[in-house]
Amino acid sequence: MKDLGAEHLAGREGVQLLGLLNLYLEQEERFQPREKGLSLIEATPENDNTLCPGLRNAKVEDLRSLANFFGSCTETFVLAVNILDRFLALMKVKPKHLSCIGVCSFLLAARIVEEDCNIPSTHDVIRISQCKCTASDIKRMEKIISEKLHYELEATTALNFLHLYHTIILCHTSERKEILSLDKLEAQLKACNCRLIFSKAKPSVLALCLLNLEVETLKSVELLEILLLVKKHSKINDAEFFYWRELVSKCLAEYSSPECCKPDLKKLVWIVSRRTAQNLHNSYYSVPELPTIPEGGCFDESESEDSCEDMSCGEESLSSSPPSDQECTFFFNFKVAQTLCFPS
């Protein structure tokens, strides 16, 4: 089989893509979490009072909900997970500090990736995430994370490879450009990021596995041949590739299952203080009379009942400290957001 050399790429752009791929391949090992540290987390029992895979995975799902709430891009989420895992694999972390570390990872990633106008404030992230820490705690933890990672926060991730592989394929293929959905591939990558085991995979291998599985569903011989050239150029051996492809396939099968995609009717919780509730107008509590919906309408009884449960008034705060009496605070329910962030 031919190698993926500059002579097989389309002009100057192709040569630049090849150079960027070589650069990513050189850098990927440098920004991978320590495998020994990840293995120690994997081996920790779920009931132990130390960091276990379940706690880490739950925190990454919270990060995805947080990124979705603030409208952050996929790159911010993937980089936040990379920062989080590199730190967890390096340091012995107690579960009580995990929320603060997760928030810091998200803020550090957002400052690297997002435009200034899209970077959420520390105060807002603390309130929305309900992480039970102060702005000073966040500042101190950000410094610790940055120092332990030697201020090398901008990493080469599987998302970088996914975007690059996708662009290389589009440069080679004669098929329709929209046939390979990058949005779908990004969603699948985020699903993999929510499982600790995929942090042990090389980013180049993980990205190639995702593309390979998608190309197989498209039954495109041309795209498959291009991927084989990419695989050979990236020097990915068959044993490593097939091992991770099998794990990715199982993950995506579970991700696509009805159990994973089942929606939760309770989306948001509005929490107000007693004084605020007492000062609310009666009109906030009263239910206005609405015209009867005709029987031939587009909603049935079950849909009407479901829609009434989308918003509820919470009587108790979800955080340890009660909301201020002078504020009417709107909190995001992460347990529900994790369901909402999974596209069907």
Image: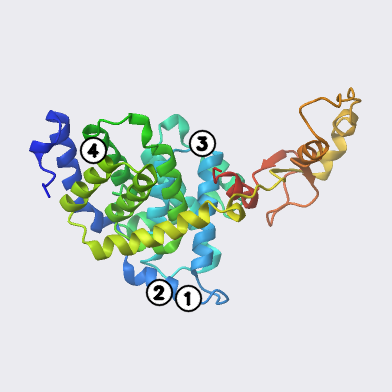
Query: Of discs 4 and 2, which sits in the foreground?
Result: 4
Q: Pinpoint residue 273: horizontal percent, then vertical percent.
A: 79, 44
* In front of the other: 1 or 326: 1
CA distance for labels 1 and 3: 34 Å
At x 86%, y 34%, the residue is 279
CA distance for labels 4 and 1: 40 Å
Dot 2 lies on which element?
helix
For residue 87, side relative to residue 260 (left or right): left
* In front of the other: 201 or 297: 297
Sequence-first disc among 4 and 2: 2
At x 15%, y 31%, the residue is 10
Marks 1 and 2 close (CB-CB < 8 Å) = yes
- Going by the numbered disc 2, the residue's amino acid type is Leu
Residue placed under numbered mark 1 in the picture: 44
Q: Residue furthest left?
A: 7
Sequence-first disc among 4 and 1: 1
Residue placed under numbered mark 2 in the picture: 40
Residue placed under numbered mark 3 in the picture: 71
- Going by the numbered disc 4, the residue's amino acid type is Ile
The quarter holding residue 291 reads: top right
Dot 4 lies on which element?
helix
Residue 154 seen: yes
Residue placed under numbered mark 4 in the picture: 168
Dot 3 lies on which element?
loop
For residue 222, side relative to residue 22 (left or right): right
CA distance for labels 3 and 4: 28 Å
Dot 1 lies on which element?
loop
Relative to 189, does residue 45 appear above or below in the rendering? below
CA distance for labels 2 and 3: 34 Å
